[in-house]
Amino acid sequence: MWPTHAREESAADRVDRRIGEAVSDCHDQVDHPPHYGGKDDPYEAIKVIDAWGLGFCLGNTVKYINRAGKKGSALEDLKKARWYLDHAIERLEELEAVEHGG
């Protein structure tokens, strides 16, 4: 059978296309992923965390509340949020105790 002018996608082309799609998907999952609000959402977790000047623990609290149920278990995300909030509270209590001679 003679080759036709219309070229079918080769295995190498399919691999290249799939790699390109995976890189694009990976970029979306790293840079403004949808489970944190996405690039166009003014309430995307990182934007809120930056706007409010939150540190690590309170930032993670907001992040896990924001994504609850959008990536895996909502219950697990809320427990993570609670863990970070409890940790921030414990740190503040320790600082207050030191400041007040406790």
Image (tube, rainbow, N blue to C red):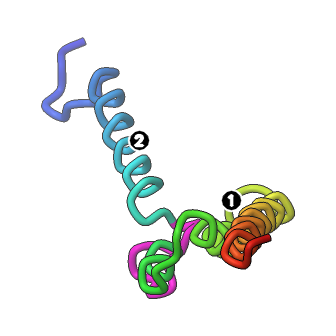
**Magenta-colored segment: predominant secondary structure:** loop
Q: How far apart are marks 2 and 1 (CA)?
A: 18 Å
List x then y, in percent, for residue 70. Answer: 69, 66
**Is 72 rendered above or below residue 60?**
above
Q: Do the residues labelled 2 and 1 touch (CB within 8 Å)?
A: no
58 horizontally vs 40: left or right: right
Give the SS element for disc 2. Answer: helix
| Kind of residue at badge 1 | Lys
Q: Where is residue 68 in the image (x, y as percent from the top left)?
A: 73, 69
For residue 22, what is the image quadrant? top left
Count of numbered marks = 2
Q: Which residue lies furthest to the front in this view?
A: 101
> Quadrant location of the C terminus?
bottom right
Please give the name of the residue rendered at 68% of the width and 67% of the height, measured from the top-left corner.
64
Left or right, 51 with respect to 71, comes to left
User: What residue is shown at x 27% (from left), y 29% (from top)?
Assistant: 13
Which mark is on residue 31? none
Is 85 placed above or below 4 here? Answer: below
Question: Which mark sits nearer the N-terminus, 2 or 1?
Answer: 2
- Which residue: 52% across, 76% down? 54
Percent x, y of residue 90: 77, 66
The quarter of the rendered structure image containing the N terminus is top left
Question: Disc 1 designates what residue?
Answer: 71
Q: Which sits in the foreground, 62 or 26?
A: 62
Using the image, tell me which numbered label, if any, was put on residue 22: 2
Let me know if residue 29 appears in the view: yes
Task: Give the residue type that dot 2 points to.
Answer: Ala
Q: What stretch is highlighted in magenta?
A: 34-44
**Which residue is more in the foreground, 4 or 22?**
22
Foreground pick, 68 / 94: 94
**For residue 81, which quarter of the picture?**
bottom right
